[in-house]
Image (cartoon, helix red, strand yellow):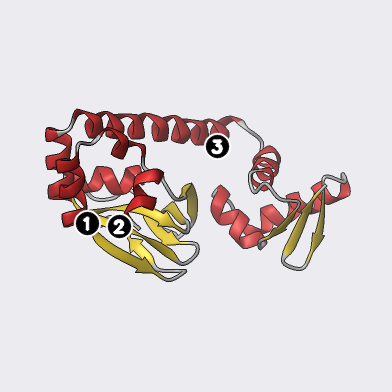
Amino acid sequence: MQEKIEKLYSFFNNLDSAKKDKFFAHAKRVNFKKGNILFWQGDLCESILYLEKGSVKVYMQNEEGEEITLYTLNPGEQCVINTSSSISSTPAIGSAVTLSDVQGFMLDSKIVKELMSESRAYQEYMFSLFSLKLTSLATLVEDLKFKPLKYRVLKFLKSKNTKEIKITHEEIAQNLGTSRVVVSRILKELEKNKKIRLNRGIITYL
């Protein structure tokens, strides 16, 4: 298990044996079922998840309960919202829910801060993490402000990297920060233009 997580996270390549021992001496092995809330928007995170298996959706909600997906975490990726809340002791600006059964390690924020101060390699990894996610979020903001919703729906479907996509109209709406009614209208229009084919619970990307 330890070898797998070391392969997934590049910073381990540059940590000396003492820092690696410190990480795993304090890291807690965790397993979460699909649909488990890891933290809510407004929570103060006290530990950081290092994902080994499964996927996690990170999203924001407004006061009416409407949500938009910020990004999806896969093995080897680290949540910038979770990390930011943990190391700065500020409320999380979004929530995180498991999209599948999840395995990984949780590391207390105190140890994370110590590793950042003691290891240049880990510090550089953290800076690169924030840089990459800021770029990703900037792209999301650009799409929201300047790209037609039809374009964003097609882009979202294409990102699934499969022709047969098992998903509901409601799930697409939540990911794109819009309503199910609007998504259904756009999907019917795309089907009419022969971009997709609609079946119950499945969308085929043509």
Disc 2, SS: strand
Q: Which residue is mark 2?
A: 105
Disc 1, SS: loop
- Decide which of tag 3 and tag 1 comes sooner along the chain: 1
The amino acid beneath tag 2 is Phe
The amino acid beneath tag 1 is Ala
Q: 186 or 6, which is in the foreground?
A: 6
User: Residue 151, how many percent across, how many down?
Assistant: 69, 38
User: Residue 191, how many percent across, how many down?
Assistant: 84, 51
Tell me the distance, in whole angstroms, between the alpha carbons under discs 3 and 2. 33 Å
- Decide which of tag 3 and tag 2 comes sooner along the chain: 2
Q: Which residue is mark 1?
A: 27
Which residue lies at the image location 14% right of the left edge and 42% below the top edge?
A: 18
Which residue lies at the image location 55% right of the left edge and 37% below the top edge?
A: 144
Disc 3, SS: helix
Which of the 4 image quarters holds residue 56?
bottom left
Vertical placement of residue 17 versus 186, above or below:
above
Q: Which residue is mark 3?
A: 144
Tell me the distance, in whole angstroms, between the alpha carbons under discs 3 and 1. 38 Å
Q: Is residue 52 visible?
A: yes
